[in-house]
């Protein structure tokens, strides 16, 4: 599922077009293993439309082990209203943060482009991230030092790219599209183990020092931090179906990544290699009827850095949303346009033949 948030700056519109082109290269490919129709029903040939509200964020967490201080830098992102559609395993969502939904923007101003793709082809879970933020404020600080909470950092920038790839062992019985996209219906409760790998890289920096000089001496303060890491992951997902059409889905995976982190201190850049445990969690709850669905979901990723100069840092990415979904069979006039987004049209002939068998 590709979510795109439109902003007023031309930069965001320019980035919109490569994302659209990327859809055709990253769209899920049909799996040749047959699904068990006693567990779930796929609505590939129906058009699944949605109206939704959502909010995305990527926070910066810094733990100072020497002074036992903990900062949380938060972007001032908007609550967005969007529309979207899913057809034949391809999803596109567009959302805008309207002013009437955000009367009080709070502390500071944030410019951002947050691209998240959460794709659920049968037997696979694929997550892609591209975060570009500028403008943060201190939302949380575990001390009574005045003037820190609410402090605005208009020039604090964050960049992060990464992906999470997992194999769903029981994809013939469990459909994550039923939970996240509502383009399928999970008829019976089911669970599955997952395994795969992830890769992430990112950095954040400020024109000045990132931490308050009242809390951290200047010789330990820093203007930037970053990391690169990759490693295996494993997890479990389960959908509980009750009263036939209601469902609760929970998914969690743990990761053990090898990588290198750095801090930009006054004396220069300090590096450290290390192994870090991370986690990725998702939750879904709602009603999935024959034609319409109402549901809420939350996705959260926590990526830790190796400890450099007794600082433990992390990037926390989240996306929570509420969806109202309506499905219908497209008519002949609409169908001829939807046929252009059939993934099999862009597959080699050999792969097409496999999918028909």
Image (cartoon, helix red, strand yellow):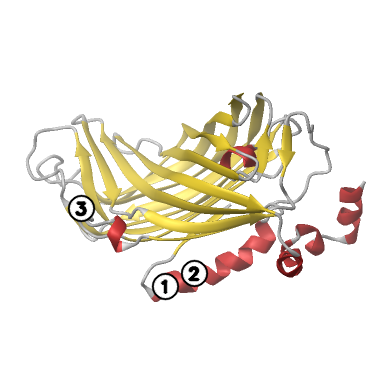
Q: Nearer the viewer, residue 213 or 162?
A: 162
Residue 114 image position (x, y, % from top left): 44, 57
Q: Which residue is mark 2?
A: 15
Residue 54 image position (x, y, % from top left): 42, 50
Residue 214 image position (x, y, % from top left): 9, 43
Q: Which residue is mark 3?
A: 106
Q: Which residue is mark 1?
A: 11
Horizontally, residue 260 falls left or right of residue 326, namely left
Distance, label 3 to label 2, CA atoms, is 27 Å
User: Judging from the image, what secondary structure is the residue with disc 2 in?
Assistant: helix
Disc 2, disc 1: CB below 8 Å?
A: yes
| Mark 3 or mark 2, earlier in chain | 2
Q: Between tags 3 and 2, which lies in front?
A: 3
Disc 3 packing (10 Å; few <14; some 14–19; many ≥20): few
Residue 202's disc number: none
Which residue is at 57% across, 69% downward?
Answer: 18
Distance, label 2 to label 1, CA atoms, is 6 Å
Q: Nearer the viewer, residue 221 or 324?
A: 324
């Amino acid at each position: 599922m590709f979510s795109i948030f439109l902003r007023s700056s031309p930069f965001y519109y320019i980035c919109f077009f490569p994302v659209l082109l990327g859809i055709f290269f990253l769209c899920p490919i049909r799996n040749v293993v047959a699904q068990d129709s006693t567990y779930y029903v796929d609505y590939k040939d129906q058009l699944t439309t949605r109206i939704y509200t959502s909010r995305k964020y990527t926070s910066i967490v810094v733990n100072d082990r020497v002074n036992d201080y903990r900062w949380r830098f938060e972007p001032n992102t908007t609550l967005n209203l969007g529309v979207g559609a899913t057809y034949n395993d391809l999803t596109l969502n567009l959302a805008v943060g309207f002013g009437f939904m955000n009367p009080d923007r709070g502390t500071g101003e944030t410019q951002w482009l947050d691209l998240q793709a959460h794709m659920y082809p049968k037997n696979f879970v694929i997550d892609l991230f591209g975060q570009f933020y500028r403008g943060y404020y201190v939302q949380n600080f575990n001390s009574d030092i005045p003037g820190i909470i609410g402090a605005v950092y208009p020039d604090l920038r964050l960049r992060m790219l990464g992906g999470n790839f997992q194999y769903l062992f029981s994809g013939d019985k469990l459909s994550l599209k039923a939970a996240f996209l509502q383009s399928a219906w999970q008829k019976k409760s089911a669970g599955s183990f997952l395994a795969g790998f992830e890769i992430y890289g990112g950095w954040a920096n400020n024109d000045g020092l990132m931490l308050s000089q009242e809390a951290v001496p200047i010789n330990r303060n820093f203007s930037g931090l970053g990391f690169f890491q990759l490693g295996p992951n494993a997890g479990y997902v389960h959908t509980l179906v009750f009263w036939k059409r209601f469902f609760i889905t929970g998914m969690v995976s743990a990761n053990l990544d090898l990588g290198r982190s750095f801090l930009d201190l006054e004396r220069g850049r300090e590096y450290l290699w290390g192994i870090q445990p991370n986690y990725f969690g998702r939750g879904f709850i709602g009603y999935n009827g024959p034609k319409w669905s109402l549901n809420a979901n939350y996705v959260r990723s926590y990526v830790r850095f190796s400890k450099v100069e007794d600082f433990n840092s992390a990037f926390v990415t989240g996306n929570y949303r509420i969806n109202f979904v309506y499905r219908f069979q497209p008519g002949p006039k609409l169908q001829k346009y939807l046929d252009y987004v059939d993934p099999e049209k862009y597959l080699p002939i050999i792969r097409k033949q496999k999918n028909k068998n």
